[in-house]
Image: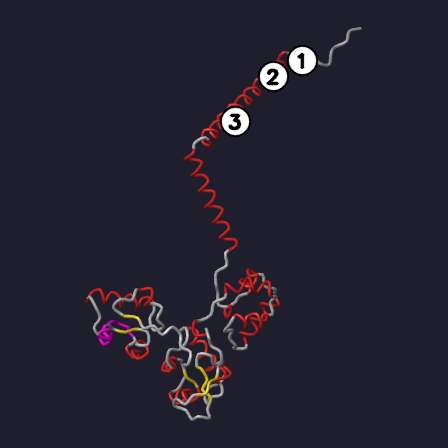
Amino acid sequence: MSWRSHFALSKSQQNGIFVLVLLIIIFQVILFTTNYFSWDDENDISENPEIEKYQRQLDSVKAAEQTFRKDTIFPFNPNFLTDFKGYQLGMSPEEIDRILNYRKEGKWINSEGDFQKISKIPDSLFLKIRPLLRFPKWTEGVVSKQVKTQYNAPRNILIVDLNAATAEDLKQISGIGEVLSERIVKYRYKIGGFRSAIQLQDVYGLKPEVIAQINTRFEVLSRPDPAVQNINTIQLEELAQIPYFDYEMAREIINYRKLHERIESFAELSKIKGFPSDKIDRIKLYLAID
C-alpha cells in the first residue's frame, strides 16, 4: 500500500511559492534601504550646527505661539466682563453672575476693591486677576463722591463729582429718569470721563434746562488726563481717539494739514466735509493750535 505525502506540491504550486518568497525579499530590501538613507539624512542634519540652531529657534517660536494662544489673557475693564472672559479667569458661574447682575442694575465698578467686593472671589484668585483689571483714568484717586464747595452754588449744597456720580445720583435732578441717567453714565465711559460739563450737550435727549439743573449739583472735580495736544503735531492714531472724530475724519484732518503744511485756525477745519464745527468748544478741550 503506497502513502502519498500531504506536503507534496505540484510544479505550479512550487513556482507560486517561489515568486511569493521573492517578492517578500524584494520588499524587505526596499524597506531597509529607505530607512537607512532616511536615518543617514537625519544624522547629517543633526551634525550641521546651523540647521540645529535654526530648528531650535523654530521649535521655540512654535512653543511660544501655542503658549500665547492658550494662556494669554489681556487686561480688561470688568464693567464689560463676559461669561467666556470670566471662565478664562477661573471665576465660578456664581461669581460671574454677581458681576453681570450688578451691571444690569445700571451700576458701575470703579475700583479693584469694588470688583472683589461685588464678585466675592477669594483672595487667592483676586491676586491673580488684579494685575489685569483696567479702569478709566478719571476713576483713579477718587476718594469721595461729594465735597463741599462754594463755586457757583450756595454753601449748603453738596456738589457731586460728575465723573463719579452714579445713575442714582443723577436721578435726583428733575427731568432725569432711568433712561437719561444711564445714558449720561454710558457716555461718560465712552469718552473716558468728562473734561468739562459742556460735554453734557452731547448726551442725546438732555435739554438745556436740565443741563442747567445738573450744573447746580454736579461739577467735574476729578478730570481725566487734561493734556491738550497740538493739532499740528498730533499723530493720526492719537487724533482718532478724540471723542468727536472717527478714523476717517482724523485722516481727513491729517491730509489737510499735510496739504497746507499747517493749520492756522479751527475755522479752517470747517472746510473739511463732515467736520463737526458745532462742537469746536468741546474739541478745544483736547486740541490746541500752536
| Residue type, numbered disc 2 | Gly
Q: Quadrant of residue 234?
A: bottom left
Tag 1–tag 3 contact (CB < 8 Å) = no
Q: Position of residue 117 (x, y in %)?
A: 58, 72
- Label 2, label 3: how far apart the Cα atoms are: 29 Å
Task: Give the mark, 2 or 3, whose residue is nearer the N terminus.
Answer: 2
- Is 125 on the left-hand or right-hand side of 275? right
Write down the residue under mark 1.
9
- Is 67 on the left-hand or right-hand side of 257? right
Q: Magenta segment, which residues?
A: 265-275
Q: Position of residue 89 (x, y in %)?
A: 55, 61
Task: Give the mark, 1 or 2, whose residue is nearer the N terminus.
Answer: 1
| Residue type, numbered disc 3 | Asn
Q: Main secondary structure of the magenta part?
A: loop
Extreme residue toward the right, this view: 1
Q: Give 227 or 136, whichever is nearer the viewer.
A: 227
Give the number of the disc on residue 35.
Answer: 3
Magenta stretch: residue 45 in it? no
- Label 1, label 3: how far apart the Cα atoms are: 37 Å
- Label 1, label 2: how far apart the Cα atoms are: 10 Å
Write down the residue under mark 2.
16
